[in-house]
C-alpha cells in the first residue's frame, strides 16, 4: 500500500508581470524552503516557449518535475529587494520593478492568521474567490502525481517594471495574458507581488526523486 505523501513547504513571494511584447515572467523568491533560500524564474515568451531559470540542478529538477517547461537552464538567479524596488537578474533576463501601496485585497489577506492561511484545508474556501477575482487557483494537481496548495498572506500591485530578455527591451508592463502555462496556479492577471506559503505533496509511491530532465542544459 502506498504511504502518506511527503509535504514540503515553501515560504516567500511570487511576483508576476506581463509585457507589451507578450513575454510573461513569474519569479519565485523563497525565503524558507527545503532547499534553503533561493529564487527561480519562469518565463513564457509570446510564441508560447516556456523557460525555467533555476540556481542549481537540485532546484531545477524539483521544479521541472512539478511544472511544465520546454527548456530548463541552471544559472544564477540574483534578487535584490530594497523597500519597494526589486531587481532580478537571471540568465537572459533583467527585470526591475516597483511595487505600490497595498490595496483592499492585500489588507484582507494580511488579516488572515498566517497559521490558518498555510493550512491546505483553508484553500477550500479561498479557491473560488481567487478564481473569480484574480484568475488563479489555490489548490490542484501538479506533475508527477503531486498536489499543491497556495496560501496567500499579502498582495502588492506592481506599478512599474522594465523587462529585458535576450538583450531586447520587452516594453512596458502589461496584464499577464494569456495566462502562463507552467501549472495550474498561474499568477494574477494584474502584475502583482504575492506573499505565499506553498505546500507541495509528493506521493511516497512515486519512486525516487526526479532525475535530471532530458531537455535541461
Image: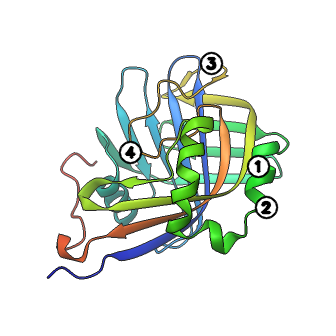
Q: Of tags 3 and 1, which is closer to the observer?
A: 1
Report the residue marked by disc 2.
111
Please tell me which residue lies in front, 109 or 215.
109
Instruction: Point out the image quarter for the N terminus.
Output: bottom left
Q: CA distance from mark 2 to mark 4?
A: 28 Å
Give residue 72's position: percent from left, percent from top: 33, 46
Please tell me which residue lies in front, 208 or 194.
194
Q: Of tags 3 and 2, which is closer to the observer?
A: 2
Q: CA distance from mark 1 to mark 4?
A: 24 Å
Please tell me which residue lies in front, 172 or 148.
148
Q: CA distance from mark 2 to mark 1?
A: 9 Å
Identify the residue shown where x is 68% and y is 44%. Answer: 87
The first of marks 2 and 1 along the sequence is 1
Identify the residue shown where x is 81% and y is 47%. Answer: 84
Coloring scheme used: rainbow
Report the residue marked by disc 4.
183
Q: Which mark is residue 140?
A: none
**Relative to 22, residue 79 above or below:** below
**Relative to 189, residue 195 above or below:** below
Report the residue marked by disc 3.
171
**Relative to 33, residue 51 above or below:** above
Label 1: how many Cα within 10 Å (few below 14, some 14–19, many 20+) = some
Q: Which mark is residue 106?
A: 1
Q: Secondary structure at mark 4?
A: loop
Q: CA distance from mark 3 to mark 4?
A: 25 Å
Identify the residue shown where x is 77% and y is 53%. Answer: 108
Amino acid at each position: 500500500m502506498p504511504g502518506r505523501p511527503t509535504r514540503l513547504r515553501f515560504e516567500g513571494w511570487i511576483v508576476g508581470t506581463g509585457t507589451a511584447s507578450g513575454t510573461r515572467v513569474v519569479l519565485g523568491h523563497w525565503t524558507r524552503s527545503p532547499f534553503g533560500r533561493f529564487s527561480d524564474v519562469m518565463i513564457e515568451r509570446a510564441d508560447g516557449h516556456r523557460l525555467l531559470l533555476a540556481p542549481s540542478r537540485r532546484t531545477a529538477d524539483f521544479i521541472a518535475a512539478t511544472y511544465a517547461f520546454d527548456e530548463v537552464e541552471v544559472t544564477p538567479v540574483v534578487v535584490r529587494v530594497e523597500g519597494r524596488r526589486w531587481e532580478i537578474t537571471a540568465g537572459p533576463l533583467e527585470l526591475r520593478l516597483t511595487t505600490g501601496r497595498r490595496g483592499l485585497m492585500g489588507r484582507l489577506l494580511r488579516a488572515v492568521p498566517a497559521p490558518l492561511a498555510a493550512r491546505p484545508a483553508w484553500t477550500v474556501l479561498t479557491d473560488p474567490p481567487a478564481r473569480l477575482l484574480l484568475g488563479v487557483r489555490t489548490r490542484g494537481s501538479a506533475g508527477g502525481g503531486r498536489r499543491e496548495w497556495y496560501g496567500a498572506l499579502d498582495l502588492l500591485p506592481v506599478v512599474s517594471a522594465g523587462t529585458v530578455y535576450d538583450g531586447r527591451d520587452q516594453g512596458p508592463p502589461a496584464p499577464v495574458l494569456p495566462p502562463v502555462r507552467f501549472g495550474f496556479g498561474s499568477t494574477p492577471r494584474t502584475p502583482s507581488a504575492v506573499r505565499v506559503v506553498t505546500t507541495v505533496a509528493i506521493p511516497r509511491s512515486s519512486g525516487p526523486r526526479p532525475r535530471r530532465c532530458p531537455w535541461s542544459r
